[in-house]
Amino acid sequence: MQPTPKSLRLHIGLFGRRNVGKSSLLNAITRQQVSIVSAHAGTTTDPVEKPMELLPLGPVQFVDTAGVDDEGALGELRIARTRGVLDRVDLGVIVTEAGAWGDFEQALLAELKSRKVPVLVAFNKSDLRVPSPAECGVAEAMGALPVALSSLTGTGLSDLRAGLLKLAPADFFDNQRLVADLVPPGEVAILVVPIDKEAPKGRLILPQVMTIRDLLDAESMALVVQERELKNALDRLKSPPALVVTDSQAFLKVAADVPKGIPMTSFSILMARFQGNLAEQVRGTLGIERLKGGDTVLIAETCSHHPVGEDIGRVKIPRWLTQYVGAKVNFAHVQGRDFPQDLSSYRLVVHCGNCTGNRKEMTSRIHRCREAGVPITNYGLTIAYSLGVFERALAPFPDAMEAFAEARKG
Ligand SMILES: Nc1nc2c(ncn2[C@@H]2O[C@H](COP(=O)(O)OP(=O)(O)OP(=O)(O)O)[C@@H](O)[C@H]2O)c(=O)[nH]1
Ligand code: SF4
Ligand SMILES: [Mg+2]
């Protein structure tokens, strides 16, 4: 898998006066000594760039800039490079301190706003002094999001992460392909779609339709079969398919019928990557190992479909998980927008594929789980895990495999 190209990373600029702690903030977020920090004003002279995976947002590139302030004024040569950064960031963080907000910050904010860049105002050094509600109000009135934090103690860093997620432009979340990056143009994907009592009458469900459409857009081919026809379909192809995608509920049969060398996964796992954060949900799946009798698992669905027959969220997943744990586990269900504010009573969240939702909303649910210390997984990952085909189903996604290997070690 290719590393994320620079253009697909969300560029986040750190701006502000000299000595407010821009470089300290970068080091605190990355937990590395990326940028030199000192009590001497004017330490950073050229922009310092740091690409990283900022959970749960995804691939970002921080740009620490040379401090500029009133004496320097915005137009001067010394700050030409910082000004260049203003022109290329997707999101701006104005770093300041309580009591320091003034014309300079106001002008910086106006510069960013004129470029339609969302702005977060980080009141750093809150270990020394916290910003007043009035100060925060001034930033808010200008359309910026105020956050109090301390790069020294780490307080407020999670609010900063949540704020960046909230401000990230929606199109940042749209650059993940559903499946086409796994099936080169001209190659075939076999899609396994069981037509059982739970299948809606006369049509396919949205994740299946989206997968077919993505393959067509990429000039790849889709061969759609029921699980009984899979073996026959494989035999008829002159060369092996690039990928087999199955409904998660047919995992066992499909894993048995597809030769080991052919990559295999499920619609729901594709959706976790497309609509959420696959690596984070893979780590969350290990939460199944920590479940014990009496724990409560939250099953969350984005749409409010009416459950029919052996509904996957109401019947099948509870059954599989109970079998896996070998004791009585409680299940709570939410649908639609009602994702709970307080997650403390849950030991695990199992989310649906979120096909009717958007990635930004799903990412913020993942973030809330992370903050609450509650692991989050999804339907396909849970089924693959409890049926013992997890690694096989993740093999097409090296990043997710790596996350799994690391989480298991930890
Ligand atoms: N108490 C406290 N001190 C901090 C905090 N963050 C940074 N500092 C201190 O503030 C000073 C300046 O920090 P830098 O991170 O170098 O500031 P900067 O904004 O990058 O400065 P320039 O590169 O000169 O523009 C250093 O002495 C830091 O140790 C904080 O949250 N609390
Ligand atoms: S939103 Fe969730 S529950 Fe509704 S159809 Fe899509 S994956 Fe299934
Ligand atoms: Mg600096």
Image: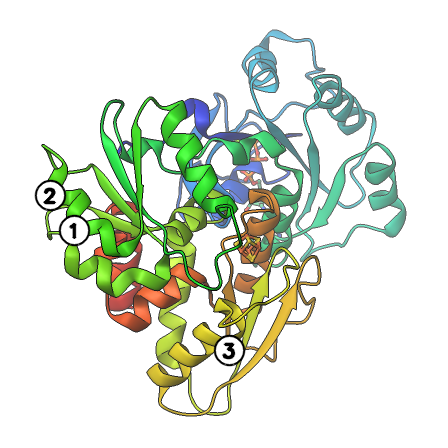
Residue 78, compared with residue 375, is above or below; it is: above
Residue at numbered disc 1 = 231
In the depicted view, which residue is nearer to us: 225 or 219?
A: 225
Amino acid bearing label 2: Asp
Instruction: In the rendered structure, find residue 235 and report the number of the disc placed on it.
Output: 2
Measured from the top left, where is residue 281 in percent x and y? 42, 58
Disc 1 to disc 2, C-alpha distance:
6 Å
Q: Nearer the viewer, mark 3 or mark 2?
A: 2
Q: Residue at x 56, y 18 (%)?
A: 88
Left or right, residue 94 beside residue 48? right
Image quarter of residue 140: top right
Q: Earlier in the sequence, mark 3 or mark 2?
A: 2
In the depicted view, which residue is nearer to us: 160 or 125?
A: 160
Q: Nearer the viewer, mark 1 or mark 3?
A: 1
Left or right, residue 256 beside residue 204? left
| Disc 3 element | loop
Disc 1 to disc 3, C-alpha distance:
39 Å
Does the residue at mark 1 contact the one at mark 2 (Cβ under 8 Å)? yes
Amino acid bearing label 1: Lys
**Is residue 193 at least partly visible in the picture?**
yes
Amino acid bearing label 3: Arg
- Classify 10 Å Cα crowding around label 3: few (below 14), some (14-19), many (20 and above): some
Residue at numbered disc 3 = 347
